[in-house]
Amino acid sequence: MSIGLEHYLILSAILFSIGLYGALAKRNAIVILMSIEIMLNAVNIAMVAFSRYIVPLLLTGQVFVIFIIVVAAAEAAVGLAIIIAIYRSRETIDATKIDLMKW
Amino acid sequence: MGLEIAFWILAVIGIGAALAVVLLRDIFRAALCLVLSFLTIAGIYITLSADFLAAVQVLIYVGAIGILIILAIMLTRDVQRGSLSNKLRIPAFVIAILFLGAVVFAMINTPWQLAGVAPLEPTTPALAGKLFGEKGFILPVEIAAVLLLAAILGAIVLVREK
């Protein structure tokens, strides 16, 4: 059985679900950020697969992936800086204990 | 035939590494598994004949973001407590499974309009034309540069000692 678009899409869906579970269920803020990176990568796989199988000569999906990678890099830098700043002031990065603005 | 074998190996290793990121107690090992997962995704890009993106994935995700995450783990000393789950563990699991089921159902039942043309190879000149050429994405490229500059400045301001 040859590999088609559906294989890549299902791989992307599985990775996205793993990242979703991690982002919802973890306490450590860095692990939450790592799960978000997994979700972004899953979306990138879907984008490249669409680009490869539906518009192979236009490469639009790959251009989108480049911009997603740019935004993800910026997000990782700012997110980790925020986590380190929170750790400096509160001595913890447990997401359940960072509840200063919780109602 | 080689493509199929490569896809299955990369997919199994990638999903296993991603599961290890979520399930391992040791945060440092989870970060290393994340790097492994990024590497297998670079391999997946190669099987999709996206050579430039595979190189970018290795450079930015494996190189930059992997090191950034490991550095952040070293700067915060919650490592000893391990990667714990919060109270929402079971609802989160149920939601993830339901989401997976819905998305896979939708993906399998959609009649995709496959082109059936061999992919463009190598992709780098075509991507450069798309990004910088006539009627390309030159405005988003400029905005991305400004965004990166703002992110770097923001990160420096946030972590600077008062």
Image (cartoon, grey):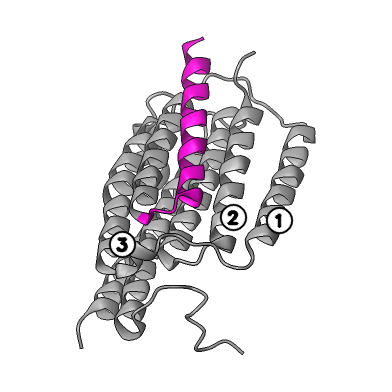
Q: Position of residue A40 (x, y in %)?
A: 50, 51
Q: Are marks 1 and 2 in contact (CB under 8 Å)?
A: yes
Under tag 1, what secondary structure?
A: helix
Same chain assignment for discs 3 and 2: no
Residue A43 in the figure: left or right of residue B41: right
Same chain assignment for discs 1 and 3: yes
Work out which residue is located at the far right of the displayed protein and give it: B109
Above/below status of B85 relative to B116: below
Quadrant containing the C terminus of chain A in the rendered view? bottom right
Residue B147 shows up from this direction: no
Residue B9 drawn in magenta: yes
Q: Which residues are magenta?
A: B1-27
- 3D distance between C-alphas at marks 1 and 2: 9 Å
Q: Which residue is painted at 42% across and 42% down in the image?
A: B130
Residue B122 in the figure: left or right of residue B85: left
The residue pinned by badge 2 equals A20
Work out which residue is located at the far left of the displayed protein and give it: B161
Q: Which quadrant of the figure has residue B115?
A: top right
The residue pinned by badge 1 equals B95
